[in-house]
Image (cartoon, rainbow, N blue to C red):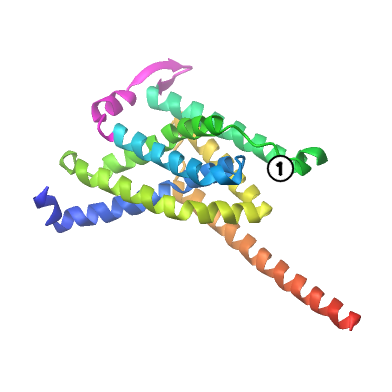
Amino acid sequence: MLELLTDPQAWITFITLSALEIVLGIDNIIFISILVSRLPPERRERARVVGLALAMLTRIALLFSIVWLTRLTKPLFSVLGQEFSGRDIILLLGGLFLLAKSVTEIHGTLEGTEEERKTKVYASFTAIVVQIAIIDIVFSLDSVFTAVGLATGDQLPIMVAAIVLAILVMILVARSISAFIERHPTIKILALAFLILVGVVLVADSFHFDVPKGYLYFAMAFSVGVEMVNIRLRRLMDARRKHSDEGEGG
C-alpha cells in the first residue's frame, strides 16, 4: 500500500480513473435526480444518498469479482449468427428498461391530466430505490469494465479509492443538479432525452455495435448549452417586459 502512495504512476491512474468515474456517472446522477423528484421533498436527499451508495457498493463488488466479469463476456448462445454473453443480456435489459422509463416519464410530464398536475402523487421510497438499484447494475458494468481496462490487477486499491471519491463528488453535486432539473422543465425533458439516447446506446452495445460515448456526451452538452442560452434569453425578455409594463403603469 505504501508503494502505491509513493508511486507517481499510481496517482496518475487514480486521478484518471476518478475523472472517468465522474464522467461515466453523469447518466446515473440524471436518472437518480429524475426518479427522486417523484418522492416527497423531505425524503429526496436520503434517496439520492442511498442510490449513489448502492452504485458505489455495486461497482466495488464487481471489481472484486474480476473472474466473474471475465466469464460474463463469454458467449452463452447465438441468435441468427449474433452471439450474446451475460454482459450483453444485462445491457439489453437495462437499455430497454431505461427506454421504457424515460418515455413513460416524458409522457407523464407532457400528457398528464390537469388533475394530476394539481395533485401530485408521490411514489414509494422502496420502489424508487429498487429502480435505482436495477439501473445501477447496468451503469456499473460500463464503469467497472473501463476501470479494469485502464488499471492493472495489482492496482485494485486504486480502483476502489477512485470509485469512492467519484461517488462522494456525485453525492455533493447531485442535490444541485436535481434542484436545477426540477426548476427548469425543459432541462428535465433534455435529461430524459439524454437517458433515451443512453438506452439506445446500451441496446446497440448489447448487439456489439460500438457507439463512442464521447459523441453522446458532446451532443448532450451542446443541447444543454443551447438551452442555457434560451433560459438566459427568456429571463432578459421577462425582465424587459416587466420593466416596460411598470413604465406604462407609471
Residue 164: x and y, percent?
Answer: 31, 46
Give the farthest residue toward the front: 42
Left or right: where 150 falls relative to 58: left
Left or right: where 83 falls relative to 236: left
- Over which residues does the magenta segment extend? 63-84
Residue 115: x and y, percent?
Answer: 81, 38
* Residue 65 shown in magenta: yes
Picture quadrant of residue 143? top left
Q: Relative to residue 214, is residue 40 depicted above or below? A: above
Q: Relative to residue 79, is residue 59 depicted above or below? A: below
At horizontal 72% and vertical 67% (from top left) the residue drawn is 234
Residue 187: x and y, percent?
Answer: 63, 53
At horizontal 78% and vertical 76% (from top left) the residue drawn is 240
Left or right: where 237 falls relative to 224: right
Q: Relative to residue 34, is residue 184 depicted above or below? A: below
Q: Amino acid at mark 1?
A: Thr
